Image: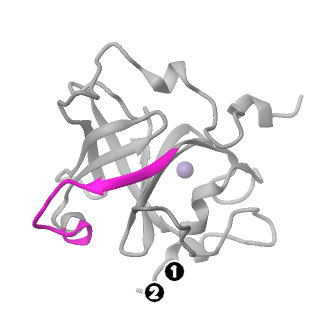
């Protein structure tokens, strides 16, 4: 299948403000981001730059910094690299209709020394070190037996902290400082 075919097929760019470009910026490493997406149900879209696209998972509860919390991450279609700066309103009747903010963003490192990110993805276990503004440290994404269902788990390292919950204490965008509610009209 063509890269991003699913992504492009699902969207009408005359109606949705979402980007279609797949150009990468000049960051020192691959990028990751988490978009808070208030659609038919609220979720957090976790995206990792792997193989020239943003591999994507929707996390209903959002990421945790507590290693005892396994967060369901449902794989969704690859997104273009240009999506990394997108926030705004997707019209109600369009695919993914609702409000999107960039909840966290940064670069990441592959923690597997002998395996590329693409191989890790194909094998169903990705181990990364995130350098976000809110999320830092090691995370594992592991595929379950159920189709498209993965789990995102914080590794036990110095960045783990069971007392913190940035999903509730830090709701604002790392790009604009806005929260979801700022996009809602009265
Ligand atoms: Mn989404």
**Looking at the figure, which quarter contains the C terminus?**
top right
| Residue found at x 19% / y 31% | 157
Q: Where does residue 88 sit, x and y in percent of width and height?
A: 74, 49
Q: Is residue 178 left or right of residue 114?
A: right
Which sits in the foreground, 8 or 126? 126
Give the secondary structure at mark 2: loop
Asked where in the image residue 176 lies, by quadrant, the reply is top right
Q: Residue tagged by mark 2?
A: 2
Residue 55 occupies quadrant: bottom left
- C-beta proximity under 8 Å, tags 1 and 2: yes
Q: Which residues are magenta?
A: 105-119
Residue 61 falls in which quadrant of the image?
Answer: top left
In the rendered image, residue 113 lying in the magenta stretch gets the answer yes
Residue at mark 2: C-beta within 8 A of ligand 1: no
The answer to whether one can see residue 46 in this image is: no
Q: Label 1: state its secondary structure.
A: helix
Residue where numbered disc 1 is placed: 5
Q: CA distance from mark 1 to mark 2?
A: 5 Å
- In the rendered structure, the answer to whether residue 46 lies left or right of residue 114 reads right
**Percent position of residue 33, x then y:** 49, 50
Using the rendered image of the protein, determine whether residue 58 is visible from the camera's viewpoint. yes
């Amino acid at each position: 299948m063509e890269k991003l075919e699913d992504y492009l097929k699902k969207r009408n760019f005359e109606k949705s403000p979402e980007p279609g470009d797949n150009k990468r910026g000049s960051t020192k490493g691959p990028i990751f981001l988490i978009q808070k997406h208030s659609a038919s149900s609220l979720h957090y879209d976790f995206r990792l730059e792997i193989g020239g696209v943003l591999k994507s998972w929707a996390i209903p509860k959002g990421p945790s910094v507590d290693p005892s919390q396994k967060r369901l991450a449902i794989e969704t279609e690859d997104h273009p690299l240009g999506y990394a700066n997108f926030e705004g309103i997707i019209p109600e009747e369009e695919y993914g209709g609702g409000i999107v903010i960039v909840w966290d963003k940064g670069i990441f490192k592959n923690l597997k020394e002998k395996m590329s990110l693409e191989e890790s993805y194909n094998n169903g276990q990705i181990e990364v070190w995130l350098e976000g503004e809110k999320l830092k440290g090691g995370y594992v994404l592991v595929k379950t037996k159920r189709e498209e269902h993965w789990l995102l788990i914080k590794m036990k390292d110095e960045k783990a902290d069971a007392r913190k919950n940035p999903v509730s204490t830090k709701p604002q965008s790392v790009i604009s400082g806005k929260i979801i509610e700022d996009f809602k009209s009265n």
